[in-house]
Image (cartoon, rainbow, N blue to C red):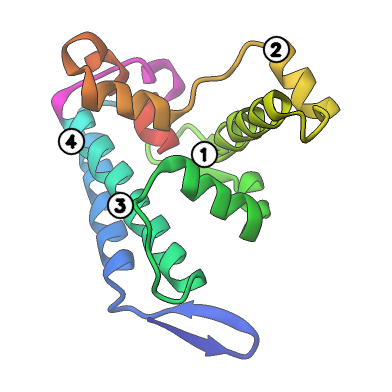
Amino acid sequence: MKEKVSGSTKLNHLNPFWLHYLSLEKSLIEISDYVAITQSNFHTYSLKNMQLYFAICVETESVFEQIYKFINKGKSKSSSISRNMDMLFDHFPEVRNTAVTLNITGESLLFKPFENMFYNHEIEIEEKSKKTGEVKMDEDVQSMKNRERLSSWWREYNGVKHQRYEKFNQANLGNLLEA
């Protein structure tokens, strides 16, 4: 699926994940014909936002699953966000620092889509360890616990997926763009 080119990795143009990404990107650009992609519109929600939000989150799960199978030489367990976060945490810790700048309608927006997920995952790990007495809570994790926990686009995706009537407003532009 990928070609090695002088020490860097190049995506194959026929990679189904890349092709689907391009399709999702096209859908986002189409949404921008109706709603300006600006911070002031982050609370705007719609059926189209929800459809694209779901598609992006499902694609994220598919990519995680493919990476998991590659790392574990084809072995697969049932997929869960916790397992996927463990995998990212152990094998790709720099994903936490991924920053994406988006400028479709003239306003430059910066996103760090995995930052909150990593913090929340660290808190979960520390809380489990604390219960079993295995690990002392890290200072950074403790300071994060003292701040308001930031909700993640993933948690809100699950809210919309499982409690659509009550949580439909979370299928908003802000969560869509974070995803």
Circle 4 is placed at which residue position? 51
> At label 4, which amino acid type do we have?
Gln
Residue 82: say if magenta: no
Q: CA distance from mark 2 to mark 3?
A: 31 Å
Q: Which residues are magenta?
A: 38-47
- The reply to whether callout 1 and callout 2 are in contact (CB within 8 Å) is no
Mark 4 or mark 3, which is nearer to you? 3
Q: For numbered disc 2, what is the local secondary structure? A: loop
Real-space Cα separation, disc 4 to disc 3, in angstroms? 12 Å
Pointer 1 or 4: first along the chain: 4
Q: Name the residue: 28% across, 46% down.
A: 58
In this view, the residue in front, 125 or 119, is 125
Count numbered badges in the picture.
4
Q: CA distance from mark 3 to mark 1?
A: 14 Å
Is 97 displayed left or right of 43 in the figure?
right
Question: Residue under circle 2?
Answer: 147
Tell me the residue at 77%/35% (across/down). 134
Which amino acid is tagged 1? Pro
How dense is the environment of label 4, judged by Cα within 10 Å: few (below 14), some, or many (20 and up)? few
**What residue sits 19% from the left and 18% below the top?**
164
Is the N terminus in the top left, top right, bottom left or bottom right quadrant?
Answer: bottom left
Q: Say which amino acid is labelled 3.
A: Glu
* Residue of label 1: 113
Amino acid type, mark 2? Arg
Q: Is residue 18 left or right of residue 101?
A: left
Please tell me which of labels 3 and 1 falls first in the chain: 3
Circle 3 residue: 59
